[in-house]
Amino acid sequence: MKNDKVVSINDEQLAIGEPTPDDREEMNPAIAALLTENARGFDLLLSDFRRDCKPANAAEDALVQMMARHFWAALRKTRIETGLVETQMEWSLDKPSIRLFAQLNDITGPGVDFEFDTRRLGVAFESDCGSNKSQLIITRVAAASDAGFLKAYAMLLKAQALRPAASPRRLDRAA
């Protein structure tokens, strides 16, 4: 039986009845992806997780959404870390020791170029550790995303193991 009670929200009259699928809150690209990210990519990721994990009810679907959110966050943190380290490596070019190394060596050779970039990476890491520690922070945050994903996945597996066994009906042919 449908509830015909009317509620006013912002001068609009809404009849309260059975919820529709559109009423349900869930992860979606509009809330999961930043403006600079590929919202369609999140939508595809969530669809892939739903396809692979086959949630059977709302609780399992919530865990799948949580897994997708944590995985998306881990991807974001990887992009942040990459940009951070590349920026810090560019800043390392201002260090006298790096400029001297470049002046004394032909950095177009593969071995020398590798050593040059390794030194720049070392300077970037060392200067980060001495000031804002952003590499350390992003690593910790990424580990938290990974742990959240693994926890949600473990909970999903437990929930799926508790599902009632789906056994096909057997017809009694003896009758």
Image: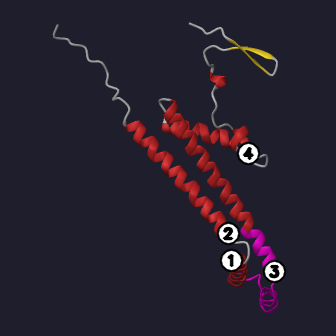
Q: Quadrant of residue 136?
A: bottom right
Does 23 sit above or below residue 113?
A: above
Real-space CA distance between mark 4 and mark 3, rounded to the nearest whole angstrom: 32 Å
Give the foreground label among 4 and 2: 2
Q: How many residues crowd around disc 4 within 10 Å: few (fewer than 14), some, or many (20 or more)? A: few
Please tell me which of labels 4 and 3 falls first in the chain.
Answer: 4
Span highlighted in magenta in the image: 85-110
Q: Is residue 144 left or right of residue 111?
A: left
Q: How many residues crowd around disc 1 within 10 Å: few (fewer than 14), some, or many (20 or more)? A: few
Is residue 170 found inside the magenta-colored segment of the image? no
Q: Quadrant of residue 1?
A: top right
Please tell me which of labels 3 and 1 falls first in the chain.
Answer: 3
Please report the residue visible at 70 percent of the width from the left and 64 percent of the height from the top.
82
Does 23 sit above or below residue 149?
A: above
Please tell me which of labels 4 and 2 falls first in the chain.
Answer: 4
Residue furthest to the left in view is 174
Q: Which residue is mark 3?
A: 93
Please report the residue visible at 60 percent of the width from the left and 15 percent of the height from the top.
18
Q: Which residue is mark 2?
A: 135
Give the foreground label among 2 and 3: 2
> What secondary structure is found at the residue carrying circle 3?
helix
Q: Amino acid at mark 3?
A: Leu
The front one of 94 and 136 is: 136
Residue 135 rendering spot, x and y as whole percentages? 67, 69
Real-space CA distance between mark 2 and mark 3, rounded to the nearest whole angstrom: 18 Å
Q: Amino acid at mark 4?
A: Asn
Please tell me which of labels 4 and 1 falls first in the chain.
Answer: 4
* Main secondary structure of the magenta stretch: helix
